[in-house]
Amino acid sequence: GISTMLDDKLNDICTLVLKLLVLGDDDRYSFEHSPNEFLMHEENVNFANSVRSTVRNVMLSILDIRPRTGYYALLQTAKKQQHEANVLVFGYLAPHYQTHKKSGDLKMEQFLQKIIGGDHGSDPMLIYRILWTLHKFISSLNMTAKQQICGKVLNCMKADNPICIRYQAV
């Protein structure tokens, strides 16, 4: 049935999911010029009929049909690059992390350190999304990992960052 068809095309579907989550130039411009307003609008639109909410529902359906293979396929696709959409997928996977944590396949601390410790330049949308995702995993990180990312998170609290970034850093 559908689960067999899904197995055959899972990597292709995951790649398409990421492409559909990428923000367009208009959205990125909107975030750069008024990030707080953009995020309020994004939250309101997410509950309406938007591409991002539809794609999120597709991801959840994949995870319902194929919990383990869907989780790892989405995770592997999201780990390939450090774009806002990839980090968004990673955040969507957070509720499923505890289920798959026992297998030891995923080194959460290493991945979070990589995305938080990376050079994000002046991409406030990516920084915001990284902090948003970190909130979903912070309780599961070991003390060493928390200490290693602490400096980066504290830097996000500086006054020259938009309020939404400073708020996510708390």
Image (cartoon, rainbow, N blue to C red):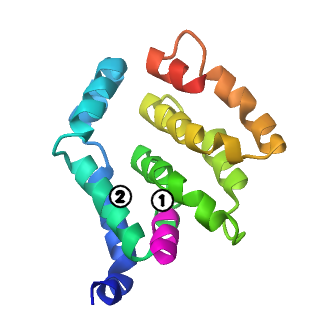
Look at the picture and state if 37 lies above or below 150: above
Would residue 121 appear left or right of 144 to someone viewing this image? left
Q: Which quarter of the rendering shows the C terminus?
A: top right
Look at the picture and state if 63 lies above or below 165: below
Highlighted magenta segment, given as a residue range: 67-75
68 is within the stretch colored magenta: yes
Who's the residue at 53% across and 42% down the image?
133
How far apart, in angstroms, are the residues tagged by discs 1 and 2? Answer: 7 Å
Residue occupied by mark 2: 18
The amino acid on which the numbered mark 1 sits, given as a three-letter code, is Ala
Q: Nearer the viewer, residue 18 or 100?
A: 100
Which residue appears farthest toward the top when viewing the image?
A: 159
Who's the residue at 51% across and 63% down the image?
75
Return the mark for residue 78: 1
64 is within the stretch colored magenta: no
Who's the residue at 40% across and 75% down the image?
11
